[in-house]
Every structure is written in C-alpha cells, then in structure tokens.
Image: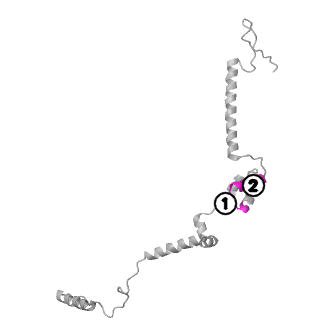
Amino acid sequence: MDQEQTFVNPAEEGKIAENSYGKFSGPEELLKAYNALESEFTRRSQRLREYEKTYGETGRSIEEQKKELTRKFNIAPELLEEAARRAETETGNRIELSLIGVLNEKMLTPEQMAENSEVVDRVLSDGKNREAVINGYIEKIKKVEVPVVFPAGGESPAMPPYKPSTVAEAGEIAKAIIEKLK
C-alpha cells in the first residue's frame, strides 16, 4: 500500500503529473465515495443523537438517576428502590427504564382496585367521596317506584271507596263533600 499520491496543481499547466487515487480510479470516484461516507456519517450521528435523547446518559450513577427522578416525579420511595435494584441487574443501570417495568407490574385496573378493601376504605375515608357515594345511592332510591299502600294523607280507609253508578248519586256525594268543607 505504499502508493504515492501526487495531485495536479491547476497553476502548473502543461506539466503532466501521474496521479494515484488508491483504490479509486479517478477523482470523480473518490469524490463520490467521500460524499457517500459523509452522508452515512451524518445518518449515524443523527441516530446516535436520537438514541441519547430517548435513553439518556447511561454513564450516570444509580444514585444520581434516583435524585433526578425524585426531583422530576412524585414517586413512592419503595418503587424507586425496587427500580434501582432492577437497573443494576436488568437494564444496564438505566433506572428510568426499570421504573417503567416496576410501575407496569404494580398498576391495577379499576376493577381490581374496587375489589381491594384497603383501596375502598381509603376512598371512602375522604368526605367528598363518601358524600358522592351517599348522594348517588339516594338518587337511585328516589327512582324506585314504591307501591301505594295508603291513599293520600296516610289514612287507612275503613271501607272500600264508593263509586256512584248514576249522575244523581254523584251529585249527592258532591253535596256531602261541600257541606263538610263549609
């Protein structure tokens, strides 16, 4: 590979120099290869930048990452500790990635939470929640149709109501009611 490279200086017209471009046959091929190499380098640099943006720096210690996560988010300490233990063994010291896994395992569906008596007790211990439950129950009860047992006024009838069969009988009943109202 001891190839001597000499380039033609445009100022030296008339002189013919021997050029060697290594494995390339001419300057056009060399320029083409350089441009391809430059574009590939740019693509790889962009991918590396995206990777760093997505996964962050892995050079930070677990303690530094824990402090950063505590500063950014309100995380229960026991979850953060579990994520730190996992990060050391599973995710290459990337605690944020481990925390996602821990949270995914600990997350419950609303149905699962409703079955947990501790969750129900905690929810109902809050006054606003308890009032909402009671008001919802009262509204549900109000919508239930109750059978009528007593006539209006709450009095129990002594005998079945009389239904007139003629207009004259109805007139007599009306006169009796008007007399009582006077």
Q: In this orientation, which residue lies closer to the viewer: 174 or 105? A: 174
Under tag 2, what secondary structure? helix
Tell me the magenta residue range: 63-79
Location of residue 120 (image quadrant): bottom right
Position above or below: 99 against 154: above
Please state, as top left, top right, bottom left or bottom right, where the C terminus lies in the image. bottom left
Tell us which disc is closer to us: 1 or 2: 2
Under tag 1, what secondary structure? helix
Q: Amino acid at mark 1?
A: Glu
Q: Is residue 67 magenta?
A: yes
Please state, as top left, top right, bottom left or bottom right, where the N terminus lies in the image. top right
Residue corresponding to mark 2: 67
Q: Is residue 30 magenta?
A: no
Q: Residue at x 67, y 30 (%)?
A: 39
Classify residue 24 as left or right of residue 168: right
Residue corresponding to mark 1: 105
What is the chief secondary structure element of the magenta stretch? helix
Q: Residue at x 67, y 34 (%)?
A: 43
Location of residue 32 (image quadrant): top right
The residue lying furthest to the bottom in this view is 158
Position above or below: 99 against 46: below
Mark 2 is surrounded, within 10 Å at the Cα level, by few (under 14), some (14 to 19) or many (20 or more) other residues, namely: few
